[in-house]
Amino acid sequence: MDGHDLKALVQVLGQKKRQLFGRVWGEQVRATAALAVGQINHPRVARILADYIEDSDPRVSQLARSALTRIRGEAGGRRERKATGVAKPGVSDPTEEPA
């Protein structure tokens, strides 16, 4: 997934209704786009999702909030691991004595 894919999903999120192949797609497609954006590992994702936490569609809003909570939790875990020198969650500190 690259920046172009992310851009396309953000365009879907930004439109309340859109015609595609003669059919109107709406909120379910936007909710699916919010879910997909929340799974992309890209530096802009948190800023993008923050724009949708107060969306008029409760599904989009909930998915944006959930993804932001997960992203912020992962970022906090990375900062903690960097500060303590432990490389990955579940990996013990090699300087500690075995229990």
Image (cartoon, helix red, strand yellow):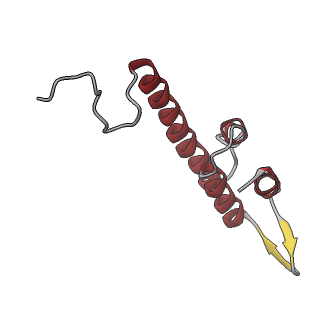
Residue at the (88%, 81%) spot, across then down: 22
Q: Quadrant of the N terminus?
A: bottom right
Picture coordinates of residue 88 (x, y %)?
A: 40, 36
76 vs 5, left or right, is left
Picture coordinates of residue 11 (x, y %)?
A: 83, 54
Q: Is residue 50 above or below residue 33?
A: above
Picture coordinates of residue 93 (x, y %)?
A: 29, 27
Residue at the (56%, 48%) spot, across then down: 62
Pick the residue in front: 18 or 72: 72
79 vs 99, left or right, is right
Q: Is residue 68 above or below residue 24?
A: above
12 vs 29, left or right, is right
Q: Quadrant of the C terminus?
A: top left
4 vs 41, left or right, is right
> What count of labels does the image hold?
0
Picture coordinates of residue 81 (x, y %)?
A: 42, 26
Farthest-out residue, left:
99
Residue at the (36%, 37%) spot, across then down: 89
Pick the residue in front: 63 or 44: 44
Farthest-out residue, bottom:
22
Farthest-out residue, top:
83
